[in-house]
Amino acid sequence: MRVAQVHIEAKPDCVEAFKQACAENAGQSRREPGVVRFDILQSTEQPTSFVLFEVYRSEEAQAAHKRTAHFAKWRADVENLIVEPGRAIMYSYVHPEKRDSA
């Protein structure tokens, strides 16, 4: 399992458009066989701050996700809606040791 937290800051006047673009991408991503979870989180303290919480079955599944048409569309759609490119932090499961799904 491979977990990514992608931290992204939307422009203040683009929050709703950003959320819509992310929701479309997340919906398509959840249909990929290698995707276990794909959640969108918004800060309650700073509404322009988002985290994409992504769980993949493997590193290969994550790489396959980045080659999809919907990922390319999402990148193009949010390019002008965000302050700067997102920052991904990668994680692996520690406990429980064996994790088949989230």
Image: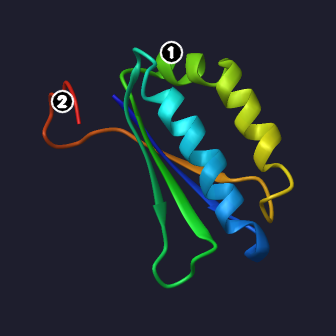
- Name the residue tied to disc 2: 99
- The three-letter amino acid code for the residue at tag 1 is Glu
Amino acid at the residue labelled 2: Arg
Mark closest to the chain's N terminus, 1 or 2? 1
Q: Is residue 71 left or right of residue 5?
A: right
Q: Is residue 72 left or right of residue 26?
A: right
- How far apart in space, not on screen, are marks 1 and 2 (Cα)? 17 Å
93 left or right of 55 in image = left
Q: Position of residue 101 (x, y in %)?
A: 22, 29
Which numbered dot is residue 60? 1
The quarter of the image holding the C terminus is top left
Q: Nearer the viewer, residue 52 or 24?
A: 24
Residue 28, position in %: x, y?
A: 52, 27
**Relative image position of residue 15 (x, y in whole percent):** 67, 67
Residue at x 75% of width, y 28% of height: 72
Q: Residue at x 70, y 58 (%)?
A: 17
